[in-house]
Every structure is written in C-alpha cells, then in structure tokens.
Amino acid sequence: MPFKIVRNDITRMQVDAVVNTANESVGYGSGLDTAVYRTAGERELLNARAKIGRMQQGDAAVTPGFRLPAKYIIHAVSPFYIDGNSGEEKLLRSCYRKSLMLAREKHCRSIAFPLISTGGYGYPKEEGMRVAVDEINAFLMKYEMLVYLVVFDAEATTLGTKLYPDLESYIDSHYVMTHERAEYGPEKFEEARVENLDLSDDFDLGDEGFQNESSERRSRRTLDISRTLAGKPELQEQSYEDFITEKESALQKRMRHMSDTFQQYLLYLIEQKHLTNAEVYKRAIITKQLFSKIKLNETYHPDKATAMRLCIGAKLNLDETRDLLARAGYALSPCDRRDIIFSYFIEKQIYDMIEIDITLEEHGLPCFIE
C-alpha cells in the first residue's frame, strides 16, 4: 500500500525524506520543529536553512537530513488557522503538493509527513487529515512513492496506550463468541449468553416489538433489565415501568423509520442528535461534495467504508450503527477483525477516524482513509 498512517516519532522514520513544519524566517519554533533540529544537528541544519532564506506560507524547500535517518528534510511553511475562510486550505494544500514534488525531484522512494498545521498552528485535525489525504492521493494517482502520515503527539500516544490491553481483550472475546456459536450452534450459544449476561445488544427486541415477544424472550429481557438496573446506580431511581416505557418509546421511533433508505435514515439520525451536516462529514473525513451527493439522492448506495465513516461522523451507538449499515445492505461481522475494531470504537464512543485508522494499520488491516 503506497499510503500508510502510522503512530511514530517522525525523526526516527527510515525514509528518504521527512517533512518538517517550518517557520517563515530562519530559525525554529517549538514542538516538531525543535525535535527535527536537535536530532538532525542544530548548527548544521540552521546553516542550511539560512541559505534558503525567508519563505512564504505554503512554500517548501529541501536540505540534507544530516543526522536523521532520512536523506532529506523538506521544510514546509505551515499556515496558521484563523477561521477556515482566510485561504488556509489553499496554503495547506500547497505544503503537501510542493513537498511531494520536491521529493520526486530528489528521486525519493519514500516520504514521511506530519499532520501539517494541526498542532500549535491550530488547524482542525479532521480537516487537516482530509486535505492531506486529498493531496497525497492526487499525487499517487500520477507517481509512485511510499507516503507515510505520521501521528505522534501526547493525545495520540496516550490514547493508543490506554486502548491496547482493552482492545485486544475485546477482539479475543468476540472471536471466542463467534467460535462458540459455530461449534455449539445458535441455541446453545443463546443459553450460554444469557447465563453470562452479555448485554451488548442493549436489549434489542427486533422489529416485532414488545407485543409479539415470546414468554421465554420476555422473561429473559426482564432478567436482563433488572440486573442492569442493579449494576447501574445512576438508573436505580428510575422505576422498572419507566425503563420499559422509555425503551418502548425509542423502539416506536425507530419503527416509524423502518422503510427509510440509507440517506433518509442518516439524515434522521443527524437531526435526532442535533448535529450539523458539517460536523458529520468533517468528523467522518469525507468531502463536502460527497456528503452533498448523499444528501441530494434518497437512493444513494455508499460503499461499506463510507457508510462506516458516516457512523463515526454522526456519533452513532452500536444499535444505530447496525441499523444504518443495514439500510445499505451491510452488517458488522464477528469474523472480521476490522469490523470488530470498528465496533470497539463505537462502543467506547471514541469517534476519531484518525485513531481508528492508526489502530487498523497497527493490526495490519486495511484503513478507511486511503
């Protein structure tokens, strides 16, 4: 795959060129800039940068890599984010475009980028990622090069460390459940599931509603709800009857939209969650043009990756995610590690496409953003 998102320290990347977020004037600032200068050799790199002279936002220039593992350092002058309407996107695109062309001129076979401008320069992370992906993919349509997008900051590394033990356990447990279902059959599996009180489906009653439940299913549901209330102090003030009424109300709302297309149900969920369309497509890291195409076409049929990204964009829970995906003819497979990891992020309410893709990459799985 010519484009990879990785969690790493860019100064340690074994590539032909690394991109540094540079200042307009000679000298270096904080963060990544400092790390690059100190690792490469402060005096040597400052002397080389002085020969380039003053640069403008959106420009890029190249120096030797000195003590870095990379042969070259490409200095891209990042734009400061003001309000999104002051030409920042044009300048950011220029940083990526010019850096890639400089790497090609130097016959580089690999290059590592930071997520330019999204640190101290204030560019929103999801918007910065969208621009990076657009420009990198446009370049790779014409030329061959291995391009890394390197995410390395306190938030990213801390989140990754916190996720891993829990995530690996989550993956393992879902594989075990799948294998048990295959080995013992659905009936035996259901009995074991009730004994272990697996409530991950949030008492999903199916399309038939409460009135058509079997007595056995109703008793299981009663037991599940009672034990859930006992285990959640914040719900104990709520009566059993209120809990059931609330569940019935939620189900009735969902049943009114049973015949919705993917597009109709997505827009309904966005409205229910009081989100704006811009919030959704930016968090999903899809273009405004694609979202407009979906919005204007009631019969729009997305690919599975786009549908899943929109679930993240709309901050759906697991039930809503399954419902929305079903409108496009998709399901989350318990046999697919990619689907399991995606489900984990949905359950944990971590609506971060960049973190999801980094995690997929670290597990050797296809990313959503390509």
Image (spheres, rainbow, N blue to C red):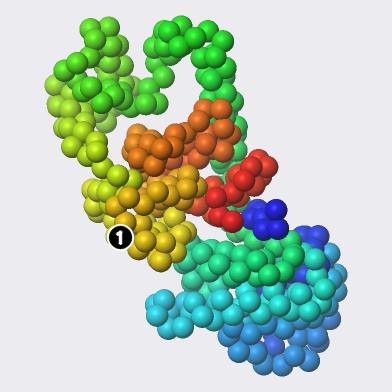
**In the picture shown, does residue 333 fall above or below 89?**
above
- The residue lying at 67 percent from left, 66 percent from top is 140
Q: As displayed, is residue 38 above or below residue 205?
A: below
Front residue of 349 and 342: 342
Look at 14% across and 27% down and name the residue there: 245
Q: Position of residue 353 (x, y in %)?
A: 50, 52
Instruction: Name the side, left or right, on which 151 lies relative to 201.
Output: right
Tell me if residue 20 can be seen. yes
| Percent of width and height locating residue 108 | 80, 70
Quadrant position of the C terminus in the picture: bottom right
Q: Is residue 136 left or right of residue 351?
A: right
Q: Position of residue 222 (x, y in %)?
A: 25, 14
Q: Amino acid at mark 1?
A: Leu
Q: Residue at x 66, y 80 (%)?
A: 98
Residue 252: quadrant of the picture = top left
Pointer 1: residues within 10 angstroms few (<14), some, or many (20+)? Answer: few
In the drawing, does residue 318 fall left or right of residue 112? Answer: left
Q: Residue 85 appears in which quarter of the rendering?
A: bottom left
Residue where numbered disc 1 is placed: 296
Task: Say if residue 312 shows up in the picture.
Answer: no
Name the spot of residue 24 as percent of width and height, x first: 62, 87
Describe the element under mark 1 as helix, strand or loop: loop
State which quadrant residue 23 falls in.
bottom right
